[in-house]
Image (cartoon, coloured by chain):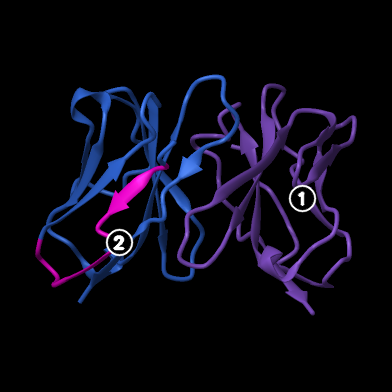
Amino acid sequence: EAGVTQFPSHSVIEKGQTVTLRCDPISGHDNLYWYRRVMGKEIKFLLHFVKESKQDESGMPNNRFLAERTGGTYSTLKVQPAELEDSGVYFCASSQVGLYGYTFGSGTRLTVV
Amino acid sequence: LAKTTQPISMDSYEGQEVNITCSHNNIATNDYITWYQQFPSQGPRFIIQGYKTKVTNEVASLFIPADRKSSTLSLPRVSLSDTAVYYCLVGDHGGGFKTIFGAGTRLFVKA
């Protein structure tokens, strides 16, 4: 089966611009998660979707971040306006209830200059 | 949220068995223990998950003592391609959707 796909793989934008990251989970996986690792720090949870509903968005750093999952399929994470401290790698993962562990995508490396 | 503690790094040689221990003193009753492997420029990859005693799959074994306050990932005969960062997570059955990723253990396998 196809894995979790994220794109773009890399994005370089200027401070103040908008960027949208996309995640395509494994087909049929109801759970979708966003994580990020900022430079030199640990991978941290951002939010969790169950189908199209936000189950938990307690990890979202501020209101410049907006995540959506229309129709319960792919998800987007928009950063608007981007700040320098938003630079890092953003990971998406998906899972299905009852299955072990998550499947992660390869991540999107975001650089804000 | 249960926090985990692992060694920062470990070195090994090809063909050796590697054991990485993780401490999770505050593990909750319904928490599972999950290990992930991560290579550079890739997302974490699920290795193994367990709740108690011992779990074995085709790539690793996971040993969990009765008090569940620690766990040990055992990689039987490592190769150069096992050089990676290994994360121990504690959380729900799916791997812990809010589980804290620690710093992980950087395993370096030498020839």
What chain letter is assigned to the residue under label 1? B
Q: Which amino acid type is shown beneath numbered disc 1?
A: Cys
Which contiguous range is marked in magenta? A3-17
Instruction: Check the image and report above or below for A8 versus B56.
Output: below
Q: Which mark is residue A9?
A: 2
Residue A23: percent from left, percent from top: 29, 44
Chain B's colour? purple
What chain letter is assigned to the residue under label 2? A
Q: Which amino acid type is shown beneath numbered disc 2?
A: Ser
Q: Which mark is residue B22?
A: 1
Residue closer to the observer: A25 or A49: A25
Instruction: Check the image and report above or below for A43 versus A48.
Output: below
Marks 1 and 2 sit apart, C-alpha to C-alpha, by 31 Å
Q: Give left or right: position of A103 versus A86.
A: right
Q: Residue at x 80, y 63 (%)?
A: B78
Q: Which mark is residue A7?
A: none
Residue closer to the observer: A106 or A65: A106
Most extreme residue toward the bottom is B111
Instruction: Tell me the quadrant of the picture where the C terminus of chain A can be found.
Output: bottom left
Residue A104: percent from left, percent from top: 46, 46
Q: Give left or right: position of B51 versus A64.
A: right
Q: Give left or right: position of B12 versus A94.
A: right
Instruction: Check the image and report above or below for A5 versus B85.
Output: above
**Residue A90 lies in quadrant:** bottom left
Q: Residue at x 56, y 29 (%)?
A: B94
Q: Residues within 10 Å of mark 2 (few under 14, many from 20)?
A: some
Q: Residue at x 56, y 63 (%)?
A: B39
Count of numbered circles on the image: 2
Chain A's colour? blue
The local secondary structure at tag 2 comes to loop
